[in-house]
Image (spheres, rainbow, N blue to C red):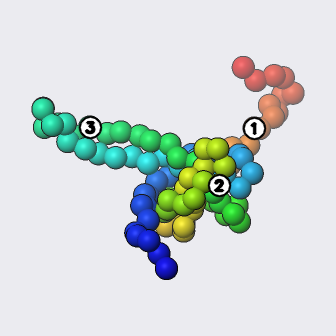
């Protein structure tokens, strides 16, 4: 029986180098109470990714969960949108010299 609604956030994966962990950047836009100007704030969350499906650039939904480790209190619920992967290959110089 659930005790209440879990908090959820939508963000972008900025790192997937850890084992079963991704770092998700959540951007919040809030209005400044004094100057009435929109202010953008970034917050990074470490989220548990059990199946290691998330890649850098993916837009994901994370939900609050029990502590999984010292810093992980969120888990990836689902991938909303896959990011575009760009592979950059270094080409060798046809003359055989070094590139500068």
Viewport quadrant of the C terminus: top right
In percent of width and height, residue 99 lies at 76, 23
50 or 90: nearer the eye? 50
Q: For mark 3, what is the residue?
A: 39
Q: How many marks?
A: 3
Q: Position of residue 53 (x, y in %)?
A: 67, 63
Residue at the spot 80% in from the left edge and 31% down from the top edge:
93
Identity of the residue drawn at 26% across and 37% down: 39
The secondary element bearing badge 2 is classed as loop
Residue 16 appears left or right of 7: right
Compare residues 46 and 26 and report the one nearer the observer: 46
Q: Earlier in the sequence, mark 2 or mark 1?
A: 2
Where residue 77 sits: x, y (%)?
Answer: 54, 67
Does label 3 or label 2 sit earlier along the sequence? 3
Label 1: how many residues lie within 10 Å, few (<14), some (14-19) or many (20+)? few
Please give the residue where the numbered disc 2 appears in the rendered image: 68
The structure residue drawn at horizontal position 81% and vertical position 34%, both measured from the top left corner, is 92
Residue for badge 1: 90
Mark in the foreground, 3 or 2: 2
Q: Residue at x 20, y 42 (%)?
A: 31
Q: CA distance from mark 2 to mark 1?
A: 39 Å
Left/right placement of residue 40 relative to residue 63 reads left
In what element is the residue under mark 1? loop
């Amino acid at each position: 029986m659930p005790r209440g609604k879990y908090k959820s956030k939508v963000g972008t994966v900025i790192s997937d180098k850890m084992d079963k962990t991704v770092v998700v950047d959540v951007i919040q836009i809030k209005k400044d109470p004094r100057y009435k100007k929109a202010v953008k704030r970034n917050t990074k969350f470490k989220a548990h990714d059990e199946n290691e499906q998330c890649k850098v650039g993916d837009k994901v939904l994370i939900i609050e969960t029990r502590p999984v480790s010292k810093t992980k209190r969120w888990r990836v619920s689902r991938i909303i949108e896959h990011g575009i992967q760009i592979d950059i290959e270094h080409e060798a110089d046809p003359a055989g010299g070094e590139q500068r």
